[in-house]
């Protein structure tokens, strides 16, 4: 609860954030930090088209605009990344803050800044951006503070380039920290044999449509890691368990789709590139749309408030998009300390000094919380007896995570913004390390390409699936996959390329590449693109909005084949019929989708619960795709039997009992009027302060699901949809579920949500010099030195 | 007459002070006016209460109209669990009025004790 008088005062409090709906964004501003004059033209959606005469001014203005429209978000998110939430909201965030620090987020950001210093262009861009943000902050008064500061009785902190690095590390955590299940796998290994483990958690799914087309020939690997001689006994054969769990594990659905079709398959004869990154949907949106123009640089797309550059977009010559590589780049090593002080740990036959990093966590309304984190040769000791829970058996685990390695992702994006052709794109992205991304590419000269780019450890078969021994160097990463051997493809005969968070290559790829892969979306995209020709932008819009449940195509036939209908009551029969008559579309009003999903989920419980819950303290729930494939191959698959009952269950039994149990839930949903998929799911976009429900949008009428191309789940999904046709005059169609203004008191706050929900797009205005008088330039902000 | 003078002075001074000083400058304004304009304590309270009640309510009303009631609806849901812009305006006026009223009461007692 904010201080009431201050908050309600019409001259200071929240009323000052109630922007007039006809507000003008015309402004004339002068700053000593600028080198020259610059202009920003806002179109009717408040997308700024920035025209600067040099890069420093360009990124100064980008920083200024991010701050003007999104300051609270970028400040809060970077404080959260650094583990400073307790300082803002009090002691309930201490465990969250400790985890961020034990994960080494600040350490990672500091190392990134060190590395970035070697690159003068990116360093200059970060510095100009920092100045721009701070120029806006220094203009703020109590009255003009963003609303969330008033609600939390908080004030903005000065921007620094470390905060920019923290934001990039936040993305690294979001996209490359939840892509492993090492600890849960370790538990699973304690119970299941290796054969069983491989069956439940396969590396390569049968139905995989890899990112680089099947049949791609891979060169002999440049590095062949060697399995330690003790691996069978000390690693694969070890049967102990781990009780730790993460406080804020990133959503595994942090995925995305992208694809590109060559001119040979399009009506226009020019390539079309599409991208929709799937992230937690939030207000303010993670994206801010912008056009950035300076000499030798003209780029349009979405930026991340908190960093300069355009992250996903297009320029005069090329377009690019990203999806998450979903690769496992984080491993755990068990550490033996000499004593409780954690000053020394056993490594290669000697007690070795651990570096101690004391974390001061400031707590609003309370005393500082001090946490000491030991750093080993592997990395920070994230879990020990003081974190995260009491069930630790006194074990300590250090993490080895690629995000800790010195890197300069900003430099890659800086160059990508300016790339004019395939060679420049390839050169730009090669230094991008973490989070590994699938960079899809198209150029006006007709090239299409994709690279899975990142820094990936070269693992021996099985390395890093489980927590590893950390008492010597034998289990350490022996090197990294040479960048040139990252899976990639250029101008394939098929005429298209795609990625959708699946494994990048089939089993002929010569490296062991575990990850948290998602299979079905890629299958659907490939099926559609294969059969399409003369493709138009409208076709691509339909595909991004596609509701076809490709997983259910296989899964439904299993359900319907094995259900014993004669054992069902009228209700059960009714629901089975709904699934029979379902058109396999996860459309908003589909009842078949709801019944199918509930039935399938119920089947998974029937099959796995007895087996998976035997694993203590917990194991990972197997993928739906895996179960479907297992049942397709073998209807007498061993895990179907419930080991807790004397009789032996068959697939007929479990499918039937699954629908019986599901019927009860479905009946409740139906009575509550929630049998339609969108009502069942209740898609919601929350404000970043999730508890402030009036700032959220609930009940958004969209269908889809995580494994459907239009991947909207409860509060997660396509955070940006972009379609770029690389004709002589670039055509781009874009939308995101948010609005350009972060202020909940602005009419622009959620402006695009309905358009997004309906699968519609805005035509992006790629403004050219000389169009200043165009009617689309609704407001102008003039910047000058002074 | 004194009531009207105090009322107008409090409103004007509160508005002007809040342009440059923190929100609680309305209390200072009400206190000063009550200390200068002789009135019975209850009347001092009432004139200041009404002055700032109306000042804050009118300011909020104008802002709210220009904002198409977007934010007031959200904040009233947050604080009051109902969506009502008018209620939000009324509560704003009441909190401002009460703050000023009590400040004026103190001012008036101070004047009396002298």
Image (cartoon, helix red, strand yellow):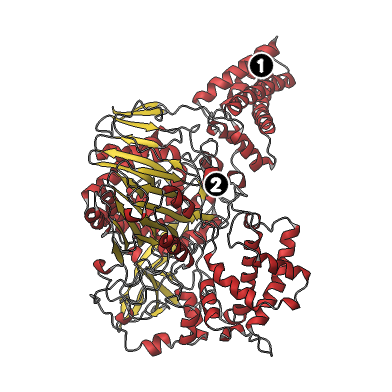
- Please report, as a chain letter, where disc 2 is located: A
Residue at the spot of label 1: B7
Whether residue A500 can be seen here: no
Whether residue A330 can be seen here: yes
Q: Is residue A693 left or right of residue A544?
A: right
- Residue A19 position within the rendered picture, expressed as x and y whole percent measured from the top left: 53, 31
Q: Tell which of A574 and A721 is nearer to you.
A: A574
Q: Residues within 10 Å of mark 1 (few under 14, many from 20)?
A: many
SS for dot 2: loop
Total labels: the figure holds: 2
CB under 8 Å between discs 2 and 1: no
Q: Image height check: is A526 above or below A117?
A: below
Q: Which mark is residue A758?
A: 2
- Residue A680 position within the rendered picture, expressed as x and y whole percent measured from the top left: 65, 58
Q: Tell which of A583 and A372 is nearer to you.
A: A583
- Residue A20 position within the rendered picture, expressed as x and y whole percent measured from the top left: 53, 28
Which quadrant: the C terminus of chain A? Answer: top left
SS for dot 1: helix
Q: Is residue A598 left or right of residue A706?
A: right
Judged by depth in the image, the label closer to the viewer, 2 or 1, is 2
> Which image quadrant is residue A499 in?
bottom left
- Please report, as a chain letter, where disc 1 is located: B
């Amino acid at each position: 609860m904010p201080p009431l008088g201050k908050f309600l005062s019409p001259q200071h409090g929240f009323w000052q954030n109630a922007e007039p709906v006809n507000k003008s964004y015309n402004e004339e501003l002068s700053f000593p930090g600028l080198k020259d004059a610059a202009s920003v033209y806002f179109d009717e959606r408040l997308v700024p088209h920035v025209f600067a005469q040099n890069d420093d001014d360009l990124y100064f203005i980008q920083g200024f605009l991010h701050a003007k429209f999104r300051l609270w978000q970028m400040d809060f998110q970077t404080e959260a990344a650094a583990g400073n939430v307790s300082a803002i909201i009090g002691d309930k965030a201490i465990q969250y803050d400790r985890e961020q620090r034990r994960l080494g987020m600040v350490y990672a950001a500091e190392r990134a800044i060190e590395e970035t210093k070697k690159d003068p262009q990116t360093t200059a861009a970060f510095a100009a951006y920092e100045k721009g943000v701070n120029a806006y902050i220094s203009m703020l008064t109590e009255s003009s503070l963003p609303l969330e500061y008033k609600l939390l009785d908080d004030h903005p902190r000065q921007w620094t380039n470390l905060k920019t690095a923290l934001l990039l590390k936040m993305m690294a955590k979001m996209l490359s920290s939840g892509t492993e299940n090492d600890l849960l796998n370790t538990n699973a290994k304690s119970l299941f044999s290796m054969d069983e483990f491989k069956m439940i958690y396969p590396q390569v799914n049968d139905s995989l449509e890899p990112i680089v087309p099947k049949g791609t020939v891979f060169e002999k690997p440049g590095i062949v890691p060697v399995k330690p001689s003790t691996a069978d006994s000390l690693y694969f054969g070890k049967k102990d368990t781990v009780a730790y769990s993460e406080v804020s594990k990133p959503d595994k659905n942090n995925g995305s789709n992208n694809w590109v079709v060559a001119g040979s398959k399009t009506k226009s004869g020019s390539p079309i590139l599409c991208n929709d990154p799937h992230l937690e949907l939030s207000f303010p949106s993670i994206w801010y749309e912008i056009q950035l123009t300076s000499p030798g640089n003209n780029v349009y797309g979405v930026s991340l408030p908190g960093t300069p550059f355009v992250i996903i977009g297009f320029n005069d010559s090329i377009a690019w998009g990203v999806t998450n590589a979903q690769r496992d780049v984080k491993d755990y090593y068990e550490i033996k300390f000499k004593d409780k002080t954690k000053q020394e740990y056993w490594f290669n036959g000697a007690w070795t000094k651990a570096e101690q990093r004391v974390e001061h966590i400031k707590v609003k309304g309370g005393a500082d919380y001090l946490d000491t984190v030991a750093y080993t040769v592997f990395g920070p000791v994230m879990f020990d007896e003081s974190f995260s829970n009491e069930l630790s058996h006194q074990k300590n685990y250090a993490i080895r995570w690629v995000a800790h390695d010195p890197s300069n992702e900003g430099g890659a994006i800086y160059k990508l913004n300016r790339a004019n052709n395939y060679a420049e794109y390839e050169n730009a992205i090669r230094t991008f390390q973490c989070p590994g991304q699938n960079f899809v590419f198209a150029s006006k000269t007709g090239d299409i390409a994709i690279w899975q780019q990142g820094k990936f450890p070269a693992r021996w078969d099985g390395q890093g699936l489980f927590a590893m021994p950390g008492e010597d160097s034998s289990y350490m990463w022996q090197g990294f996959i040479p960048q040139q051997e990252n899976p990639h493809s250029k101008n394939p005969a098929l005429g298209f390329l795609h990625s959708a968070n699946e494994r990048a290559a089939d089993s002929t790829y010569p490296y062991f590449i575990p990850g948290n892969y998602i299979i079905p979306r890629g299958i659907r995209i490939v099926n559609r693109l294969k059969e399409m020709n003369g493709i138009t932008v409208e076709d691509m819009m339909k595909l991004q909005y596609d509701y076809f449940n490709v997983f259910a195509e296989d899964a439904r036939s299993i359900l319907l084949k094995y259900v014993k209908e004669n054992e069902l009551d009228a209700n059960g029969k009714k629901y089975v019929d709904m699934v029979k008559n379902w058109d396999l579309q996860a459309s908003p009003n589909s009842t078949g989708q709801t019944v199918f999903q509930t039935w399938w989920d119920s089947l998974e419980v029937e099959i796995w619960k007895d087996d998976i819950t035997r694993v203590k303290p917990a194991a990972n729930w197997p993928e739906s795709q895996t179960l479907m494939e297992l049942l397709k191959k073998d209807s007498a698959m061993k895990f179907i039997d419930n080991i807790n009952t004397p009789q032996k269950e068959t697939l007929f039994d479990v499918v039937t009992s699954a629908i019986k149990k599901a019927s009860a839930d479905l009946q409740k949903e139906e009575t509550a009027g929630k049998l339609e998929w969108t009502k069942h799911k209740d898609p919601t976009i929350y404000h970043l302060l999730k508890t402030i429900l009036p700032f959220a949008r609930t009940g958004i009428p969209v269908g889809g699901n995580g494994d459907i191309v239009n991947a909207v789940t409860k509060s997660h999904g396509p955070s940006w949809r972009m379609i770029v046709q690389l004709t002589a005059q670039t055509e781009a169609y874009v939308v995101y579920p948010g609005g350009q203004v972060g202020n909940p008191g602005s009419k622009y706050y959620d402006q695009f949500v309905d358009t997004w929900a309906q699968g519609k797009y805005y035509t992006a205005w790629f403004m050219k010099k000389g169009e200043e008088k165009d009617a689309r330039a609704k407001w102008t902000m003039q910047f000058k030195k002074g | 007459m004194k009531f009207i003078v105090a009322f107008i002075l409090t409103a004007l001074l509160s508005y002007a002070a809040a342009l440059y000083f923190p929100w609680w400058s309305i209390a200072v304004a009400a206190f000063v006016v009550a200390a200068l304009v002789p009135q019975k304590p209850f009347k001092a309270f009432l004139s200041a209460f009404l002055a700032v009640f109306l000042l804050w309510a009118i300011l909020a009303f104008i802002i709210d109209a220009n904002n198409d009631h977007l934010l007031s609806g959200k904040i009233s849901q947050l604080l009051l669990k109902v969506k009502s812009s008018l209620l939000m305006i009324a509560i704003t006026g009441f909190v401002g009025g009460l703050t000023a009223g009590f400040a004026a009461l103190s001012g008036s007692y101070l004047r009396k004790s002298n």
